[in-house]
Amino acid sequence: MTDTATDSPDGRPRCRWCAGAPEFYLSYHDHEWGRPVGDDHRLFEKLSLEGFQSGLSWRTILAKREDFRAAFEGFDFDAVARFGARDVARLLKNEGIVRHRGKIEAVIHNARCARELVQREGSLAAYLWRHEPKPLRRPRNVSTSATSIVLSKALKQQGWKFVGPTTVYAFMQAMGLVNDHAEGCITRAEVERARQRFVRPGR
């Protein structure tokens, strides 16, 4: 997050990260990033894609997102949990995704962890939203938070992979558990209204 916005190509103020690749980021920023999500498959998708992003740019992942969705059964973790060695081999040949064996195997492994978590907690959404932090003004350019550290540790204790505090915080920003749109960004107030209307899962 940055604490002030900057003008985009259309002259409207947005979060500074949009300037990196506006052709990819503007629509994602305006219509998705920071808006609260309560759907288990979308939450699992985002955690998975954040893992794939490790060492890469979000632009790379966003450009391949539809191919990722097709490859991983729409990130239906019940379906992905049934993937085996043949599926890993198939995915390693898929040029539409990031062909990294460790990350592919982590998604399959995490799908099994997600399935177990849902059996215990009722839904992935209810568990993740339980870690929503209290609203506070974030310092400039943060990449973790106390809450993301706690959630990362909890997921790791349950066996999840590629869920470090930075990955988890990026997930929380994108899925609306925090509103990290910059001050002055055209979307910040709208996202905050969406968060106020959002019915937290499991409550």
Image (cartoon, helix red, strand yellow):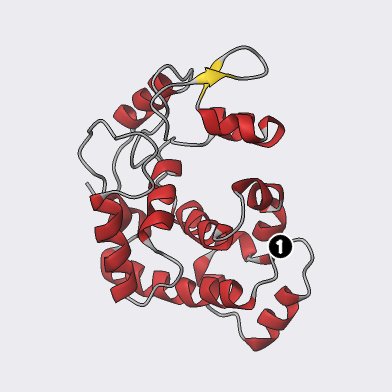
**Residue at 63 percent of width and 66 percent of height:** 72
Q: Is residue 131 visible?
A: no
Q: Mark 1: which amino acid?
A: Ile
Residue under circle 1? 97
Quadrant showing the N terminus: top left
Q: Who is closer to the viewer here, 182 or 74?
A: 182
Q: Position of residue 156 (x, y in %)?
A: 33, 72
Q: Is residue 149 left or right of residue 77?
A: left
Disc 1, SS = loop
**Residue at 27 percent of width and 71 percent of height:** 120
Q: Is residue 195 visible?
A: yes
Circle 1: is it few (<14), some (14-19), or many (20+) Cα within 10 Å? many
- Toward which corner of the image does residue 175 lie, by quadrant? top left
Q: Position of residue 3 (x, y in %)?
A: 38, 26
Compared with residue 77, is residue 59 higher up or lower down, i.e. above or below?
Answer: above
Q: Position of residue 35 (x, y in %)?
A: 44, 35
Compared with residue 121, is residue 6 higher up or lower down, i.e. above or below?
Answer: above
Compared with residue 13, is residue 153 higher up or lower down, i.e. above or below?
Answer: below
Q: Who is closer to the viewer here, 86 or 168?
A: 168
Q: Is residue 153 left or right of residue 61?
A: left
Numbered disc total: 1
**Residue at 56 percent of width and 80 percent of height:** 82
Q: Who is closer to the viewer here, 190 or 62?
A: 62
Name the outermost residue toward the top.
11
Q: Position of residue 32 (x, y in %)?
A: 53, 36
